[in-house]
Amino acid sequence: MGSHIHRMKCGELRHDLCMEPEISVIVPVLNEANCLAATLESVANQNTNVPWELVVSDSGSTDGSFDIAKRYTDRVICCEERGIGAGRHFGAVNASNSSRYFIFIDADTVIPGYYLAYVYETFKTDPGLVAFSTGFEFSEQSEQIKLAEAVANKYFLMRDKLLSVTLPGFNTCVRRDAYEECGGYRNVLLEDVDFSRRVHKIGDVKFFPHIKVMNSSRRLESMGLLGTVYYYAQLDLGGKLDSTFIDRLAQKLRVADMREYVGIRK
């Protein structure tokens, strides 16, 4: 499916001319049945003439996520290594050879209908741009959530203007050659910051706040606003991230398993 079969709102399938994909949308999954269909539906309903594919990288789901993914694409691959970084990278190395651009979104992220077209045109018009991310909004909109949303978007924009861009992994677009040159995602703590620092050495990296995807606030709700800000500040400042530090941080924030939260599942 993907590049030449698109799911229509009525549930029927429309077959276009078969073309080699230029874009690979990569979605890492582990037991995401509650939100996966909405995410994949937003990919399937993209308004673009650019050929694309959808690659779902499943790390052993037992809740029906695999079957949900199969309704949207035949590119469902099984990643034996647990962890969000491993899942993303496994999807990238298994993308079609023709693909020139990788788009990484998480299983709880919904993209607007023009997203793939925007990504393609942005890369096409700026040859020096190797990677970028966009703004986001939370699907839940309590006062606390709205505050966290504003703070996070301002933070990413500040890094774009003053420091080096941090690309949030749930919404990252990168040229394939730059991804391969920098080594791609690694299965480490805060894998998106690690990736951002390495790809930044290849070329220009940007954050575009005027485009927004919709993301779940479930992780924020599990840690609280202050806990989330503290967590990202500590990691992004480059402190020593050994297991003892993570265990102490988990206790302080009252999160049962910080490694589970950041995607390092052992």
Image: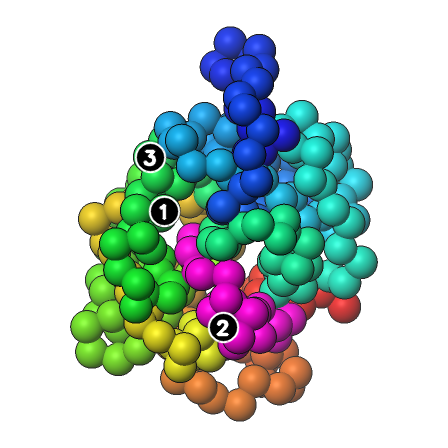
Residue 68 place in picture, x, y as percent: 68, 30
Q: Residue furthest bottom?
A: 240
Please give the residue where the numbered disc 2 appears in the rendered image. 195
Q: Secondary structure at mark 3?
A: loop
Q: Secondary structure at mark 1?
A: helix
Please give the residue where the numbered disc 3 appears in the rendered image. 114
Tell us which disc is closer to us: 2 or 3: 3
Please give the residue where the numbered disc 1 appears in the rendered image. 120
At 57% from the left and 50% from the top, the residue drawn is: 98
At 63% from the left and 49% from the top, the residue drawn is: 96
Dot 1 or dot 3: first in sequence order is 3
Dot 2 or dot 1: first in sequence order is 1
Dot 2 or dot 3: first in sequence order is 3
Residue 224 place in picture, x, y as percent: 42, 58
Determine if the magenta segment contains residue 239.
Answer: no
The magenta span reads 170-195
Dot 1: few (<14), some (14–19), or many (≥20) neighbours within 10 Å?
Answer: some
Residue 145 place in picture, x, y as percent: 33, 48
Q: Please report contact status of discs 2 and 1: CB closer than 8 Å, yes or no.
A: no
Dot 3: few (<14), some (14–19), or many (≥20) neighbours within 10 Å?
Answer: some
Cα separation between marks 2 and 1: 21 Å
